[in-house]
Image (cartoon, coloured by chain):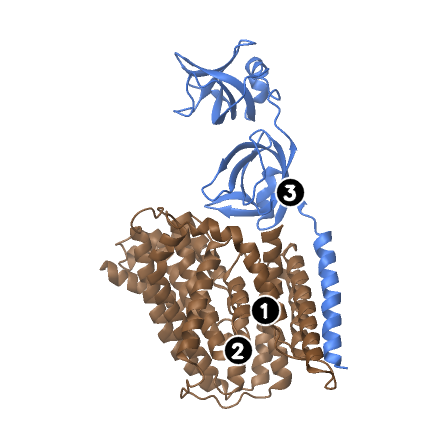
Chain colours: A brown, B blue
Amino acid sequence: MEPLLGLLLVAAVGALAGAATGLLPSMHVNTLAVVLLATVPLFAVALPAVGLVAYDPAFYAAALILAISISHTFVNIIPAAYLGAPDESAALSVLPAHRMLLRGNGFRAVRLSAFASFFALAVSLALVAPFKWLLGPPVDLFSKIRGILPLIVLVLAVALVLGEPNRIGPKGWHPSARRLAARAAAVVVFLAAGAYGLIIFDLDLGAYLPVPPSPLLPALSGLFGAATILTSFVATARIPHQFLRMHDADLRPAGAAAGLSIGVAAGATMSVLPGLTSASATGLVAAVRRGGDAETIVSLSSVNTANAVFNLAMLYLFARTRSGAVIAIEAVLPVHAWTGGPPHDLVLLLIVALIAGFGSLVLTLAVGRFLVRRLQRLPYRGLLAGVLVWMTATVVAFTGWIGLLVFVVGTALGVVPVRLGLRRVPLTGVLLVPILTYLWF
Amino acid sequence: MDQVLLFAAAAALVGLGILLGIARATEPTQASLADVAKHADRTVTVVARVLSADTTASGALRLVLTDGNVSLNAFAHEPPAVLPGDAVEATGRVTKYRGVWELVIDRQEDLLVVTPWDAEATPLALLSERPWGFLGMNVLTLGKVESGPNGEVLVDPATGARLRVTGAGGLIGEGAGWLRVGGLIEYDEEGNRFALRLINAWPAATPG
């Protein structure tokens, strides 16, 4: 089989597999990467049988893992928007996407996210070479960013909390007093979420499945997933009619460009910093972005896809593994350091990423359109209940009974800002406080 | 007053307290190096001696730990100052990397030096006189390298102790001065004698 056709096939299979994982509520691509890693020895037997012999089986395995991780970042908006059931990286996209669903623009949220991911992929691929130039010699931003990062994150965290725009309290209070009450409440929620984040990372979680348990799965599923589902369950008996015709008037080109730029920059920055994931990046972006729901979705979707590309670049530049997918790639593929021109393997992998991204864009739009039509015919509360049961089962399977407790506590905590009338952004303290602790102490 | 809010806040507070209690009660399991595989993906604490310590390009520390019989790889993201020979208490998550079990140590405070390495802990004279007593064990000792007709030999000029060294390759050479040497005591069938199969060697200060 021609080499390019082989890459096309791997990218297509990866896009399909990533779409499957992206559609499953609470399923993270790292989980699938671990499973794939265990099946790599089968590749040496299976690949020649289908004519894939142009490259080493290990390369095809790495390409498949990359394609899946890229595709996952496209499709995971669908359960987040339609069901309020995100994975770790889409947790903060739930809120604006779900609001759009309730306004009849659920498919529009999916469409925005898919195109944002694709443009972020294209921009990130184009920026890989400048990324190397910036981080390595002569600019050497790598060490400089790490030096001032603690200050940057501290400033962002303060801005996040003090930037609460809502007002709470009795109507008879002075507006400034109500705003002060809202900010004080935001501080309390942020600190409570931060304490929650510090505690959960010290827990020894069990699992019924052979994948390393992560406390972020039950925590983010509870804070942003189950809390949203419970709120929707109470407030929404059925979803309104979903429009398939697009009305893009409320998304300004400048806003979209700004969202895309911030998302790509955040995704690139998070790939450089140890201990920070795409979930962390979305938390920081949500803290600084003040646009409408459409612009917020563009930012958050861009972060995840850009982060996947730059994580791969970091592997070749500095031998850093910043995500489960890249850890799996590094485990199967010998990585040659990128010192002069880009390594041949890296170029091929980036081509696979682009092909998988295009396929994922088409898949996301098709699946999103298909599902939103059927969503309106289903009993919404029944569907939400089913998702909640699935989410609970996933939490128990991947993190055990202590993970279930984490999930329940996260759900209770996630309901608090909603009932108070605050943004849910202070809940990102679950990620930011551990980050700040890691950076400052 | 919003009763749902009160209930959620109370549930969150109680839940946080319970989680904190569980976190404090769930101390890392003490494990021996030979049993780490039984604690896959869990956090354990091991006490062992550092056989080798190499800094990676990212500034992390890749260690080989030994209890005298079994070796275990460890990877410390934010390592404190640790030298080969130090007895350490290491707390980390047991994972498999490229098919080999290793301990991943995330925080600096999870790698504690219990006893700094004592250069005289296993004198070369003792190894030379009674090598069978150390057969199959990973040991650390101090000596100088000489080349002989049958390969490299580790010597202690003060005591005259000599011990054949195998597997050195080009790692050490005559004239390298005093070395701290880590390796496995084994029976060399070819040479029909006991020998130290070299794992690693580091320059050492001349003993006082």
Please, which residue is most extreme toward the left here?
A2
Asked which secondary structure carries label 1, the reply is helix
For residue A96, the mark is: 2
Q: Position of residue A75 (x, y in %)?
A: 44, 72
Residue at x-position 53% and y-position 55%:
A149
Instruction: Specify the subunit that label 3 lies on.
Output: B
- Local crowd size for mark 2, using a 10 Å CA cut-off: few (<14), some (14–19), many (≥20): many
The subunit letter for the residue under badge 1 reads A
Query: Which residue: 54% across, 17% down?
Result: B206
Label 1, residues with CA under 10 Å away: few <14, some 14-19, many ≥20: many
Q: CA distance from mark 3 to mark 2?
A: 44 Å
User: Marks 2/1: CA distance?
Assistant: 16 Å
Q: Of the residues shown, which amino acid type is indicated by label 3? A: Thr
Which residue is pictured at 25% across the width and 61% down the height? A4
Query: Mark 2 or mark 1: which comes first in sequence?
Result: 2
Tag of residue A221? 1
> Comparing marks 3 and 2, which lies closer to the viewer?
2
From the image, tell me which residue sits under label 3: B45
Q: CA distance from mark 1 to mark 3?
A: 30 Å
Q: Which of the pair B37/A212 is nearer the observer?
A: A212
**Residues under numbered marks 1 and 3 in contact, where contact means CB atoms less than 8 Å apart:** no
Q: Secondary structure at mark 3?
A: strand
